[in-house]
Image: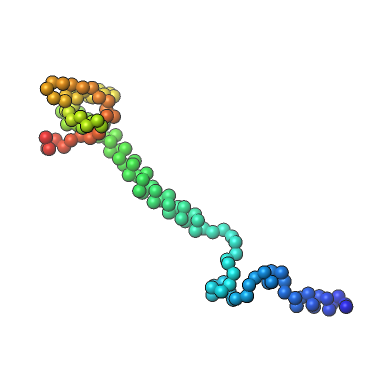
Amino acid sequence: MEWTEYLAQQSAAPSPAEVAQPQGGDPASGGGSAPAPGFDWTFFLILGGVFVFMYFMMIRPQRQEEKRKKDMLSTLQKGDQVVTTSGILGSVASVKEDTIMLNIGDGARVEFLRSAVASVRDKSKK
């Protein structure tokens, strides 16, 4: 056998890649093989979508609530009707840097930390 005959036989025989690939048409028609491995952006798109969802559903509302409470505590003044985190109702008798003095009724005054104020009641609802 000459080398030209050997090369002709080798070119006619299927390559190992062709043998491993099933027959069935192109991958777009649904009868072919799986897509070639490579970089897939869908994972990063889904991850980004989850992050955006978490930001708008959890992080942003929490920051807005913290800002609202900080503004409320910084604007406390004498005479405001407040509710503490323990549920005590009272009116602000005096305001200091970190504490407030609450008049809770019958001349009783109690000193609370500013951070213990949960909300300021609407003055029109007295």
From the top left corner, tell me how far across and down residue 93 is, in percent. Answer: 17, 24
Going by the picture, which residue comes out furthest to the right?
A: 1
Q: Residue at x 30, y 40 (%)?
A: 65
Does any portion of residue 117 appear in the rendered image? no
- Rendered view: 2 above or below 57: below
Say left or right for 81 vs 15.
left
Q: Residue at x 28, y 36 (%)?
A: 69
Does any portion of residue 119 appear in the rendered image? yes
- Rendered view: 121 above or below 106: below
Say left or right for 19 vs 33.
right
The C terminus: image quadrant: top left
From the top left corner, tell me how far across and down residue 15 is, in percent. Answer: 72, 71
Say left or right for 22 vs 65.
right
Q: Residue at x 59, y 76 (%)?
A: 25
From the top left corner, tell me how far across and down residue 27 is, in percent. Answer: 57, 72
The N terminus: image quadrant: bottom right
From the top left corner, tell me how far across and down residue 75 is, in percent. Answer: 23, 32
Q: Nearer the viewer, residue 79 or 20?
A: 20
Q: How many marks?
A: 0
Q: Quadrant of residue 12?
A: bottom right
Q: Nearer the viewer, residue 33 or 125?
A: 33
Q: Nearer the viewer, residue 86 or 8?
A: 86
Say left or right for 6 vs 44.
right
